[in-house]
Each structure stands twice: as structure tokens, then as C-alpha cells.
Image (cartoon, rainbow, N blue to C red):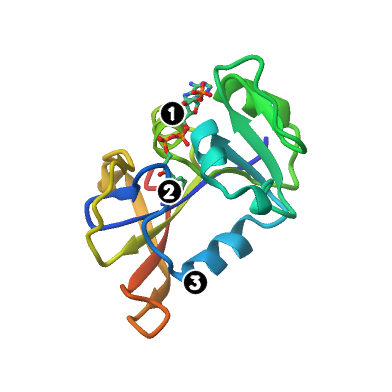
């Protein structure tokens, strides 16, 4: 079975996006996302896919999987599925790559509710942005947390952030 992982960056209010876009520019978090998901399978909602500028999609060096209920939706060089379950089944025998849930809000909710996650990489940004899309509220006590990275405010980062790896507490 392929390992199911999730990666997200959120503000202090669990905000993840506004007007179908990201709300911050944090180069070192962007680099963490790229390095962590490279060569893996990345699974995204159709709105998240739409939000990626055309010149950057599909995300390079990763298998791009899009979830939509629209059975006529197509996107070049991407795989399209109509349920999370169907996508999981398609890759379940792939033991070499992680199945990375990369958002947005609706897809994070699906994955958390399905209780399939073996790890979550969460960037907690030390700021409040005016989000219209949020990461689902989840019970922190169900998870163990390990700090992976800490970024202070500098000329390239308007807010500091911390990256944690969460694993189920069992
Ligand atoms: N901060 C972060 O780490 C991060 C990461 C990713 C995205 N974002 C942000 O999140 C926002 C987008 O999130 P969102 O919640 O609006 O949309 P989303 O989760 O990206 O996509 C929603 C779409 O996914 C499809 N979908 C939902 N449930 C489904 C199901 N059960 N089966 C099959 N398809 C399903 C539907 O597509 P159809 O309508 O085509 O049927 C739905 O409209 C943007 O602002 C983006 O910038 C932030």
C-alpha cells in the first residue's frame, strides 16, 4: 500500500487561501513543499489545480492527480479521478511513492475524515491573513508532533513559521 501523506501551510486561524489563491510568499516554505513532494504523487482538488498558474502546472517531477466530480474534465499530463477512493485504489500497489494530499480545503477535509493519513507536514505561519478557505479543525491530541524546521522573520519572510511532522498518536 502506498503511504498517504498530507502537506499544508496555514495561518494562526487555520486559514489556507483566499479568492482561490495563496495569501503569502514564503520562499523557504515553498522550497520545503517542493523538496518534500518531488518524485511523489500529488493529489489536489480541481480548484487547487485551477489556482496554479498555467506555466507552473502540472507541478514538475511529480505525478499530478486531480479530483473532480465533473466527468468531462481533462487536464494535460494529469490523471483525473472522481473520488478519493478511486484515486487511492489506482495507486495502492505503488510502494515507491507517497500519495501526497496537497489541498485545498475540500480535499484536506475528505482525507482527514477518511482517516487514511499516516503523516501530515504542517507549516504553522505566525500571522493572521484574511482567509476564505480553512484547514479542517482536527484534534491535536490524536497526533504526535515533531519540529522539522523553524523560520524567523527576515527580508524574504514577512512572517516566521514552523514546520511540524504529525504522525498518528495511536
Ligand atoms: N495553504 C496551503 O497549503 C494550500 C494548499 C492547497 C490549496 N490552498 C488554497 O485552497 C483554496 C482551494 O481550496 P478549496 O477548498 O476551495 O477547493 P479544492 O479542495 O482545491 O477543490 C475543490 C474541488 O474538488 C473537487 N472535489 C471535492 N470533493 C470531491 C469528491 N468527494 N470527489 C471528487 N472531487 C471532489 C470538486 O471539483 P469540481 O467542482 O470540478 O467537481 C471541488 O469543487 C485556494 O485558495 C488555494 O490557494 C492552500
Quick check: 22 left or right of 54? left
Quick check: 27 left or right of 19? right
Q: Residue at x 34, y 81 (%)?
A: 152
Image spot of residue 151 (x, y percent): 39, 77
**Mark nearer the N terminus (3 vs 2):** 2
**Mark nearer the N terminus (3 vs 1):** 3
Q: Residues within 10 Å of mark 1 (few under 14, many from 20)?
A: some
Label 2 beta carbon within 8 A of ligand 1: yes
- The image quadrant where one finds the C terminus is top left
Foreground: 103 or 95? 103
**Mark number, residue 110:** 1
Instruction: Determine if residue 92 is in view.
Output: no
Q: Residues within 10 Å of mark 3 (few under 14, many from 20)?
A: few
Marks 3 and 2, how far apart in space? 16 Å
The local secondary structure at tag 1 comes to helix
Foreground: 47 or 33? 47
In this view, the mark in front (3 or 2) = 2
Quick check: 91 left or right of 121? right
Q: Residues within 10 Å of mark 2 (few under 14, many from 20)?
A: some
Marks 1 and 2, how far apart in space? 20 Å
Marks 3 and 1, how far apart in space? 28 Å
- Is 159 rendered above or below residue 2? below
The local secondary structure at tag 2 comes to loop
Q: Mark 2 = which residue?
A: 21
- Is 92 rendered above or below residue 14? above
Foreground: 155 or 108? 155
Label 1 beta carbon within 8 A of ligand 1: yes
Q: Mark 3 = which residue?
A: 27
Q: Residue at x 49, y 71 (%)?
A: 27
Amino acid at each position: 500500500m502506498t503511504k498517504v501523506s498530507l502537506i499544508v501551510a496555514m495561518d494562526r486561524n487555520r486559514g489556507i487561501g483566499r479568492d482561490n489563491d495563496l495569501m503569502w510568499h514564503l520562499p523557504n516554505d515553498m522550497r520545503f513543499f517542493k523538496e518534500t513532494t518531488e518524485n511523489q504523487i500529488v493529489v489536489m482538488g480541481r480548484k487547487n489545480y485551477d489556482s496554479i498558474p498555467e506555466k507552473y502546472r502540472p507541478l514538475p517531477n511529480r505525478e499530478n492527480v486531480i479530483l473532480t466530480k465533473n466527468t468531462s474534465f481533462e487536464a494535460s499530463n494529469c490523471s483525473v479521478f472522481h473520488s478519493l477512493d478511486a484515486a487511492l485504489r489506482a495507486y495502492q500497489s505503488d510502494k515507491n511513492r507517497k500519495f501526497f494530499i496537497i489541498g485545498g480545503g475540500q480535499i484536506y477535509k475528505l482525507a482527514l475524515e477518511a482517516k487514511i493519513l499516516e503523516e501530515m507536514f504542517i507549516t504553522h505561519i505566525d500571522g493572521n491573513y484574511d482567509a476564505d478557505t480553512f484547514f479542517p479543525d482536527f484534534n491535536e491530541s490524536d497526533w504526535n508532533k515533531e519540529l522539522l524546521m523553524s523560520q524567523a522573520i527576515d527580508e524574504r519572510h514577512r512572517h516566521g513559521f514552523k514546520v511540524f511532522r504529525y504522525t498518528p498518536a495511536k
